[in-house]
Image (cartoon, rainbow, N blue to C red):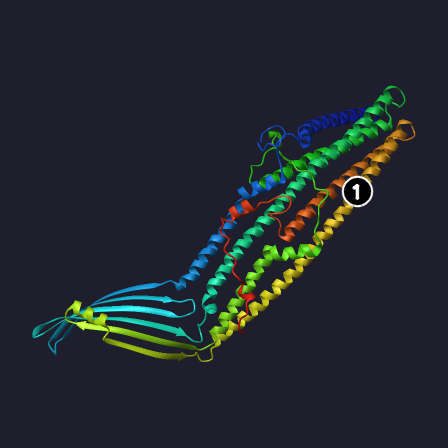
Amino acid sequence: MNKISFTQTFAVASARIAATIAAATALTLSVAPCVRAEGDSSDAEGKEGGARLSLEECLRRTLEANLSLSAQALTIGIAEQGVMSADAAFDSQLGLDLLYEKTRSQREGVDSDRRRTDLSWSKKVRTGQVLRVTHNASRSNGEQDVPIPPFYDLDWTFSAVQPLAKGAGRTVNMAPVWIARNEEQRAVLATEEEIMNLLGRVEAAYLNLMYAIRFLDVQQSGLKLAQELLAKNEELARIGKLPQRSIEVQQAKASIATREEGVIIALSDIAKSADSLRRLMNLPVRQEEEGASLIPADEPLTELQIPPVEESLSFAIAHRPQVQSLKFVLDSATLELAAARNNRLPNVDLRADVGFAGANGNYGNAFDELSEGHDYVWQVGLSVSYPWGNRAARSQYNQARLNLERAKILLNDFLEELRLEVVNAHRNIQTNIKRMSSTKAAVEQAELQLQLENELFTQGMSNSFRLLQFQDDLIAARIRHLAATIDFNGSYYSLLRVEGRGIRNQQFDLTDIAEKILRQARPQRRKLVSDRDLPM
């Protein structure tokens, strides 16, 4: 390339760099004042610079508007219907039978008709006993040579069947209801877990936006340092202390172009992070040119009281939804095993019946005879049956026993996994605390070195290349310190989720809105059958 073409090319490149810097500066001015503003905490959008929202405000908006939570909460209502369906086995049964019978015997020359009404009430008790009350009333007419007057026959029968082996006892009869209630509790816990997972995604998006905005500040400060260096070099070239085409000037311009790229990327990251946060809050995504954005109102946490590992583990075991859900799985498996064990027994039923009757050609007289109780019958009996081989019951028992062992293994395995999660969460916090300390010291050293190098540059004992290197070192140190601080916050929120404190902790309390999402459908905690002694 000849001298003229090189000069033209350099002039065009310089013009493009200057135009890009001007555009980046204009975009930066629309964001930077909002990041540093502290007076306006309005939630209204559309103002210049966007809306400032605290983390708690973002979390609340997410819980109020997120559609996936609404769908998850419906499973609680579905589980409630399952409880009602299982409990319906103990509902009373009412019966009514109406019968009209017409008979004719040609050999005996008899014509007769009969009207019969049967009323019945039955109910299964939760201990397995079945009670039944029946009332039969019939009216018979006959005709043989001469008409036979109507005849009324009335009776009341009371019966009870008490299982003595298979089907006896409250546990085996209530097992389906208790299992359905366990599923209802698991639906509540699954919704709680979904809430905490969603809050974790919001916290991560909030921290990403916080990091992106502060990353832009770092990139802007680096760009400003390069611009100041270019201004110094151009002034030195103007007064003749540097050649007009000095390498010092070109190095400063090249650094400006590189750092201006970092500003552009930072602006793009801010827009992406804000869009991710808006999506979680079910807000419409806005284009950058509309001027609306989300600005974190909170500052990153730098000091916290962290509980000991064992305290965190104890709290997590007591409050983590997955632990409670696995306990309900274990409880249901215990109930199924108890029912399957009972089903292996033979059918031994004790039955008792007592009946009163009244009969007369007049309905009133028949009813009076029934009421007096002179005509009665009672019986007591015992029935026994047992399927040959009883293979179905034995197979169900073996399946229930294996399911119980599997539930125990899954619970113990998750408890070990939970211990590892708690230990790693504490380890990450301690690592990030050390990172914040070391990166803060690195920033201070980089600032001191840059200051000393500036003094040497002013005295003519250094050059732009070395000065730009020290500036790059300071920018890198600030980015590392920023990353360590944001990671510390992320590890803290991760510990809260591991412990099961995602809804309520020392920073915010979202219990009210969480209960609203659950539609106040949390059932009363029933003592688990697995916590009671059952016959083996």
Q: Position of residue 221 (x, y in %)?
A: 76, 32
At label 1, counting other C-alpha atoms closer than 10 Å, the crowd grade (few under 14, some 14-19, many 20 or more) is: many
472 or 390: which is nearer to us? 390
Front residue of 8 and 405: 405
- Residue 103, percent across and down? 16, 72
- Residue 497 in the figure: left or right of residue 147: right
Secondary structure under tag 1 reads helix
Residue type at mark 1 is Thr
Circle 1 sits on which residue?
Answer: 439
Most distant residue in the top direction? 239
User: In this image, 171 relative to 145: left or right?
Assistant: right
Q: Is residue 295 left or right of residue 339?
A: right
User: Residue sitting at 80 percent across and 30 percent down?
Assistant: 226
Q: What's the residue at 59%, 42% (across, down)? A: 59
Q: Quadrant of residue 475?
A: top right
Q: Quadrant of the C terminus?
A: bottom right
Q: Quadrant of residue 366?
A: bottom left
Q: Quadrant of the N terminus?
A: top right
The residue that appears at 87% across and 26% down in the rendered structure is: 246
